[in-house]
Amino acid sequence: GESVGLHLPTLSVQEGDNSIINCAYSNSASDYFIWYKQESGKGPQFIIDIRSNMDKRQGQRVTVLLNKTVKHLSLQIAATQPGDSAVYFCAENMSAGGSYIPTFGRGTSLIVHP
Amino acid sequence: DTAVSQTPKYLVTQMGNDKSIKCEQNLGHDTMYWYKQDSKKFLKIMFSYNNKELIINETVPNRFSPKSPDKAHLNLHINSLELGDSAVYFCASSHLDRGYGYEQFFGPGTRLTVL
């Protein structure tokens, strides 16, 4: 789900299914992208990142895809587990005077049903 | 061995008061940040600070001010608290290599409630 509207987008999946969380970013000059996971009552935690010179990067059970043409980022989680239930944020980063200023997307709530 | 720590975890106060939230990181990072997360989970950067420059989000009221006594600490001072300041505030830190971004490490958050 993309981050639009007033309510937090929600994606509900069954345990074992694959999950795809989408993100539309705003700035074509952004060159570094990060996915974060935020569990209830905790701060966001880094999952995976990708730089603009790549279109795909894989981690353990997670894959990030970057489509710069349409300014779209996705996070794929394989064999989703109940422990994956959290809010997921994409963050785009753009160099501004040498510093990187991150802008976070709206967030998507992932609910995994056992 | 907490990487980024914040105190207090909960802060309940009256409108008009002045309060501070402390943040410390032991990761050796040179850049620290403050974020505000509202009730709809929207995460908005307030400040980015390293030992050379402070970058302020222009939408942040000047009642909010970061204070960095040293590289490992970035405290947030808030004057004349308003109801709309109620939110969860997160501190974060990262390396900063100009021209090459890095992921941020977040603290556990401080839930501020203004009555």
Image: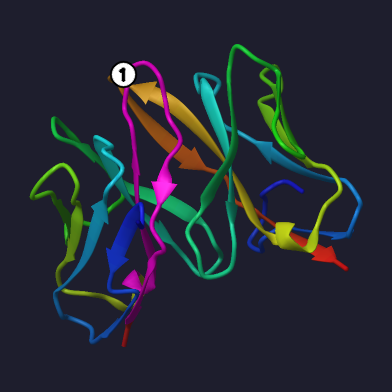
- Residue B75 coordinates in the image, percent (x, y): 18, 57
Relative side of A104 to B21, left or right: right
Q: Which quadrant holds residue B58?
A: top left
Front residue of B64/A32: it is A32
Q: Kindly tell me whether residue B56 is visible in this rendering.
A: no
Residue tagged 1: B98
Task: Please name the residue shown 43% across and 25% down the image.
Answer: A94
Residue drawn at x 43%, y 30% is B102
**Does dot 1 land on a helix, a strand or a loop?**
loop
Q: Could you tell me residue A113's position as x and y percent? A: 86, 67
Which residue is found at the position 74% from the left and 41% from the top? A22
Magenta-drawn stretch contains B110 = yes
Residue A37 spot, x, y in % from top left: 60, 51
Identity of the residue drawn at 63% across and 61% down: A6
Tell me the amino acid under the disc marked 1: Arg
Q: Is residue A76 visible?
A: yes
Q: Which residues are magenta?
A: B85-113
Q: From what the image shows, is residue A23 above or below residue B63?
A: above
